[in-house]
């Protein structure tokens, strides 16, 4: 049996998911393949059991995810019989947008943010579940559980609906949408403890292993395929690393770690001295950058 | 990769997460206190500290020291203005417990934000500046916390360093506060002398205030026992979603709001009065023998009875209240004031019902708790009100149950969340009436008449031709030996509704009564023909909800207003023109045309006879006239 605090968090997430499915016409779950998505998916399956998931999953593929993420995604979809939609911004591909030449900001804007908006519009989804948590980042701390987006997916932090008790205002007009953060009140440690106790499969990149890496601007980048050009004098080195968060591989910083099992990760978490977003190269420019990205429709 | 089962690393935390709110104005050092709490309990990571140090130089107000307030004030605008304008949720975990902190602004113009934060909290830290003592804002914060049902308070006497760690000063403030808070219903009040800036008694014991022998703030938060309490109360299970994966399974998904239940126990559906027993308590991890407050489960029942989202299951001997009117504390949260009589969407648990404030009994001054007269309610004002709902709502007093006693107001037009309410008690002469289930049901009554009951609802402007066509339909049905009954707006206003005028509240009540009468008649097997202007879409939707959408046929008698005014069969339009009538639908009061009526009659294009036939055709197509 789960400890009480995890049982309560799980029940809270289930309650949110059921409410959204009861009130919206076309919900979707954004599946990013990471640990938070894995937990969110696991909880969703519990929430609607014995029925199958009453919504599809959407993965916005930037084409720069780690290869192990993609194989994990496909295996998960097959194992659980999921209705998985994979969306790639074809226009971005045609324009040759990539994280190396275009820079992280443009790549993220085109291949993640724009791609997400395209996919939501294309399928007419009116509510999208995301696995973001309030403990991740400062502007997320003020995020609602049901986050209202006006037509065009715009987030206006000044015009969010007050959220009291667990009484969600699910009313929207044509063209407006809702982002739903069912795991808002989970912490990174809660997520790992839950993964451990519920035996939830996660991408192997979270566990330490010898992997080929280069060091750039203080970050350790894994060489996942031949697309990462080596700078002059740079040679790949094998390092014992793992990831706390996963994204596009050239933008994901690894940490040196010996945590090879889930218990090791939980133990490491309890003594961690840096935040999980530290490995995210797309956040570092300035403190308000996440807020800016969110206003433009980033998850 | 599949994770191996856990062997030894089991979390040491055995207590539930504690959710608390911090109340204080900017100057009280609230954000600094929370920042300090996070920092001293090693919950701020190195990289965050780096950013903080950089930001402290740029925006900070603590000289060369780290400004912990910057950790909490997340949004750009707030950092620039140096104030907290929204609710921020912070998380930290100690080996003993995990915490969620709602950090909310303390100024009076942010009462709604504070109420929002308080609605999620079990405990409040109320900050007082040791130099200033109990102030008006302290009273306001305490009152709002009490109103929102918080029962545990920490009185953090902050900036104790600035009064030279003076014991007498601390004692005086504690004494003042205890005297003031006596009437607010708090179960525990723990005063602690602290310094957010220097960390005294936050995480570590103060070396300067050695006269204080109580707990440090964190120590108290880690150890205080706040029984969720709700498990010991009456069983309430609001149905959120009906789970029907196949014809053999029908489960009701929801979270137990309070109390506990076991398989085999008898339950009643509060709104309909139907009783049955719990068959199974289903979860993905296997069936449970019992479930208690906080558990998210799916329940199946012994008998197939009609249950949907919004229904509440309880035990037959301890039922929630069912009433269409109740008294409640209301906090207004929108720039547009609350107007009594105006319709709002109310969300009460998983029920969504149209409702309005029928009377503001008194407004409450949040600073003095004084009762004041009020005709309306503006942003951030709180009042004790009578609320009327279009359909009976199922609820408990908020004092007894936060889950089933709270509700929000949503504006029909803007969809904004405009208010929040806490139910005090039902308004009805006899509160001991529970709904009785009858043995002969409506299907059997209808079968005797060889017809299927329904409600045909004619809507349209005054003079559109509703009653004329309705009358023709009635005649045709009579000629076909069908049992029908025509309810006409004007006729009912001579009797049943003689006490009602044309204010928005009265119009709502008018339609509510008509809908109830129509439903009774349909229940007895009749085809009920109703002719009412019924300008509000929400109102008509409500009737549809009451009658059931399968049996509700909306007929839109579509005549342009110029034509209605030209016909003017009752001479009303000329009276409007001369200013003798106000609030006339289509002129100075809005008519919301149906978007998808079951029958759309364009009277400029077809005769009355054809219109009536079109209605009868729909009845035939729906097999209503099949014997």
Image: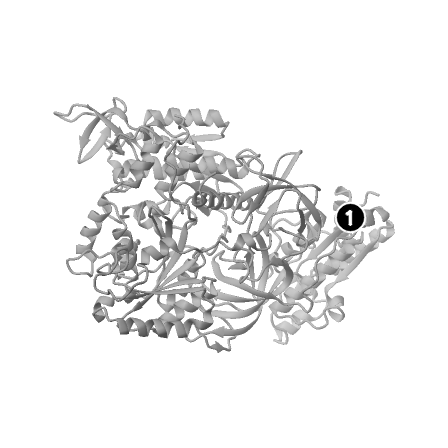
Residue B8 or residue A214, whichever sits in front = B8
- Residue B429 visible in the displayed image: yes
| Residue at image mark 1 | B616
Residue B296 or residue A15, whichever sits in front = B296
Q: Is residue B168 above or below residue B417?
A: below
Q: Quadrant of the C terminus of chain A?
A: top left
Which residue reaches farthest top? A226
Q: Position of residue B18 (x, y in %)?
A: 40, 52
Quarter of image, res B201 = bottom left
Please give left or right for residue B362 compared with residue B188 in the image. right
Q: Is residue A75 above or below residue B565?
A: above
Q: Position of residue B285 (x, y in %)?
A: 53, 35
Q: Is residue B368 above or below residue A166?
A: below
Q: Residue at x 75, y 42 (%)?
A: B621
Please give left or right for residue B521 compared with residue B97 in the image. right
Q: Residue at x 24, y 35 (%)?
A: A103
Residue A143 or residue B417, whichever sits in front = A143
Quarter of image, res B281 = top right
Please give left or right for residue A176 compared with residue A255 in the image. right
Residue B433 or residue B449, whichever sits in front = B433
SS under mark 1: helix
User: What's the colour scheme?
Assistant: one colour
Please give left or right for residue B369 compared with residue B306 in the image. left
To which chain does the residue with label 1 belong?
A: B
Looking at the rendered structure, the number of numbered marks drawn on it comes to 1
- Residue A150 visible in the displayed image: no
């Amino acid at each position: 049996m789960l400890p009480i605090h995890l049982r309560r968090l799980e029940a809270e997430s289930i309650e949110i998911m059921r409410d959204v499915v009861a009130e919206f016409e076309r919900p979707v779950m954004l599946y990013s393949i990471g640990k938070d998505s894995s937990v969110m998916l696991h909880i969703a399956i519990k929430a609607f059991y014995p029925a199958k998931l009453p919504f599809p999953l959407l993965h916005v593929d930037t084409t720069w995810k780690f290869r192990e993420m993609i194989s994990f995604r496909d295996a998960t979809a097959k194992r659980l019989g999921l209705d998985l939609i994979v969306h790639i911004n074809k226009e971005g591909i045609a324009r040759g947008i990539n994280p190396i030449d275009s820079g992280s900001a443009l790549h993220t804007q085109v291949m993640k943010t724009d791609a997400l908006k395209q996919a939501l519009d294309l399928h007419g989804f009116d509510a999208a579940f995301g696995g973001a948590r309030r403990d991740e980042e400062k502007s997320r701390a003020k995020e609602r559980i049901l986050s209202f987006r006006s037509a065009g997916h715009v987030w206006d932090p000044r015009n969010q609906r007050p959220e009291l008790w667990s009484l969600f205002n699910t009313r929207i007009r044509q063209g407006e949408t809702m982002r739903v953060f069912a795991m808002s009140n989970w912490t990174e440690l809660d997520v790992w403890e839950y993964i451990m106790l519920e035996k939830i499969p996660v991408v192997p990149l979270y566990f330490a292993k010898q992997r080929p890496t280069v060091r750039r601007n203080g970050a350790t980048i894994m060489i996942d395929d031949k697309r990462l050009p080596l700078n002059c004098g740079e040679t790949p080195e094998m390092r014992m690393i793992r990831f706390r968060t996963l994204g596009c591989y050239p933008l994901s910083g690894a940490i040196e770690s010996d945590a090879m099992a889930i218990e090791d990760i939980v133990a490491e978490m309890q003594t961690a001295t840096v935040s999980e977003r530290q490995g995210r190269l797309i956040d570092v420019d300035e403190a308000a950058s996440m807020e800016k990205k969110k206003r433009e429709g980033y998850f | 990769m599949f994770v191996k089962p856990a062997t030894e690393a089991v979390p040491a935390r055995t207590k539930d997460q504690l959710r608390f709110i911090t109340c204080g104005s900017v100057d009280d050092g609230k954000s600094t206190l929370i920042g300090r709490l996070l920092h001293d309990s090693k919950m701020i990571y190195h990289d965050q500290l780096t950013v903080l140090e950089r930001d402290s130089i740029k925006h900070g107000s603590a000289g060369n020291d780290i400004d912990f307030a910057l950790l909490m004030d997340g949004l750009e605008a707030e950092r620039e203005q140096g104030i907290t304008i929204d609710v921020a949720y912070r998380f930290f975990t100690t080996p003993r417990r995990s915490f969620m902190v709602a950090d909310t602004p303390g100024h009076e113009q942010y009462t709604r934000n504070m109420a929002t934060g308080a609605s999620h909290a079990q405990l409040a830290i109320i900050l007082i500046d040791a130099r200033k003592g109990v102030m008006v804002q302290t009273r306001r914060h305490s009152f709002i916390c009490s109103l929102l049902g918080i029962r545990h308070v920490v009185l953090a006497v902050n900036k104790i360093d600035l009064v030279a760690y003076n014991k007498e000063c601390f004692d005086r403030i504690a004494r003042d506060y205890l005297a003031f808070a006596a009437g607010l219903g708090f179960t525990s009040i723990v005063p602690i002398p602290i310094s957010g800036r220097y960390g005294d008694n936050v995480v570590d014991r103060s070396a300067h205030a050695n006269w204080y022998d109580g707990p440090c703030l964190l120590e108290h938060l880690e150890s205080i026992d706040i029984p969720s309490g709700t498990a010991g109360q009456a069983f309430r299970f609001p149905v959120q979603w009906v789970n029907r994966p196949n014809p053999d399974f029908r489960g009701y998904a929801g979270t137990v709001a309070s109390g506990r239940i076991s398989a085999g126990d008898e339950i009643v559906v509060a709104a309909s009065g139907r009783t049955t027993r719990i068959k199974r308590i289903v979860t993905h991890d296997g069936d449970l023998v019992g479930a208690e407050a906080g558990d998210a489960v799916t329940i199946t029942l012994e008998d197939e009875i009609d249950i949907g989202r919004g229904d509440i299951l309880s035990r037959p001997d301890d039922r929630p209240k069912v009433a269409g009117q109740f008294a409640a504390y209301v906090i207004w949260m929108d720039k547009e004031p609350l107007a009594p009589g105006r319709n709002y969407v109310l969300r009460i648990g998983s029920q969504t019902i149209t409702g309005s404030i029928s009377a503001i009994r008194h407004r409450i001054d949040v600073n003095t708790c004084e009762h004041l007269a009020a005709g309306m309610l503006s942003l951030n004002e709180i009042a004790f009100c009578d609320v009327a709902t279009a359909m009976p709502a199922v609820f408990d007093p908020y004092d007894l149950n936060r889950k089933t006693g709270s509700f929000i107001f949503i504006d029909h037009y803007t969809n904004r969340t405009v208010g929040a309410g806490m139910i005090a008690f039902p308004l009805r002469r006899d509160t001991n009436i529970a709904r009785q289930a009858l043995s002969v049901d409506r299907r059997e009554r209808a079968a005797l008449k060889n017809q299927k009951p329904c409600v045909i609802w004619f809507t349209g402007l005054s003079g559109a031709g509703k009653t004329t066509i309705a009358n023709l339909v009635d005649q045709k049905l009579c000629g076909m030996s069908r049992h029908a009954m025509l309810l006409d707006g004007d006729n009912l206003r001579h009797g049943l509704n003689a006490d009602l005028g044309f204010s928005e509240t009265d119009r709502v009540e008018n339609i509510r009564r008509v809908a109830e009468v129509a439903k009774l008649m349909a229940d007895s097997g009749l085809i009920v023909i109703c002719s009412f202007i019924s300008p509000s879409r929400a109102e008509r939707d409500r009737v549809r909800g009451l009658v059931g959408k399968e049996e509700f046929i909306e007929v839109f008698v579509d005549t342009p207003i110029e034509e209605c005014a030209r016909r003017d069969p009752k001479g009303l339009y000329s009276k409007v023109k001369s200013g003798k009538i106000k609030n006339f639908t289509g002129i100075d009061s809005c008519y919301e045309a149906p978007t998808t009526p079951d029958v759309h009659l364009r009277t400029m294009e077809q005769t009355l006879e054809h219109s009536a036939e079109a209605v009868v055709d729909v009845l035939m197509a729906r097999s209503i006239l099949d014997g």
